[in-house]
Image (tube, rainbow, N blue to C red):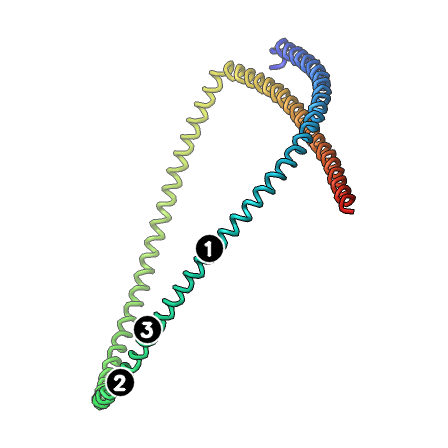
Amino acid sequence: AYCTEHKDWIETTRICAVKIQARWRSYHIRRKKLDAAATTIQALMRGWWVRLRLFRHNAAVTIQRHVCGMLCRKELVRLNESVCTMQRLVRGGIARKFVRAKRQHLHTVAVVIQHFWRKYKLSLREFEVREEEARRVAKGRVAVYCQRYYRGWQGRLKAQEKRSEYMHSWQRNESATKIQAHVRVMLAKQKANSIRQGRLMMMHEAATTIRKVYLGHITRRRYLLLKQEFASHTDAIVVIQRYVRGYLIRNSMYNTAVKQEENLWAAIEIQRMWRGYAGRLSWEVRYEQVWSREVAAALLQKWVRGW
């Protein structure tokens, strides 16, 4: 029914989509040709620019190498003289400081040894006096401890007898009390459980009946309201469906176009990075060849002149 009522709109939408696809494909083909031409021009310009930069770089490197060598040798001579002077002064100062510290350390060690030796002799005399006093005090303490232990032993025997009599009578009374308490608790629990079970069964049945009636009333009322709402908004629901479907189709077409554009841009970026890497690699190989020839020539000149 929906397709029959909106046949014209659906046909118009299909024709628009076909035209959009045709325009996009023609634009994509033209863009590919233009990109290919731009890529060729970029490759030629970059090759010319790299060769020019390589020539200028080699000339600058040769000049820099000679100038830097002269400056480095001059600076090295100056630094060697300065370092020798600094080492001589620093080593002399360190040696004098070490001698003064060693002399002070030996004096301090001698004073400390004398101090501890005198203290040790004094402590030996004090230790002998304290030992004598401790032996005298220990004899009196041992006598007191013997009397206390004997009297405590006699008192503990008597207390043990009294404690045994008391514990026997207390255990008998406590056992009788516990038996009575357990029996009374058991009887009370049985009676309380029977009353509680009856009350719980009655309350469960009442709560189930109330909940059943209330849920039935709520469900019927919601169903009637929902039915009335759907009956009064049929046209609005159809319009919402139309707009949502149109939005989904347009969004899908837009996402497809964006994805193709991103893929094209990514391919161009990959080509640019790869060509840059290949150019740098080629430049490094050529630079290595030139440098190797220069080093070999320098070695040959050195050997020939030395010979």
CA neighbours of label 3 inside 10 A, class few (<14), some (14 to 19), many (20+) = few
Q: Is residue 289 above or below residue 24?
A: below
Foreground residue among 91 and 237: 91
Q: Label 3's element?
A: helix
Q: Mark 3 and 2 residues: CB-CB less than 8 Å, in contact?
A: no
Q: Is residue 278 left or right of residue 95?
A: right
Label disc, if present, on residue 125 of the rendered structure: 2
The amino acid pointed to by label 1 is Val
Residue closest to the eye, 96 or 172: 96
Gap in Å between the C-alphas at discs 1 and 2?
53 Å
- Disc 3 target residue: 111
How many numbered marks are there? Answer: 3
Q: Quadrant of the N terminus?
A: top right
Marks 3 and 1 sit apart, C-alpha to C-alpha, by: 32 Å
The image position of residue 205, as x and y in percent, is 38, 44
C-alpha span from label 3 to label 2:
22 Å
- At 41% from the left and 60% from the top, the residue drawn is 97
Q: Amino acid at mark 2?
A: Arg
Res 90 label: 1
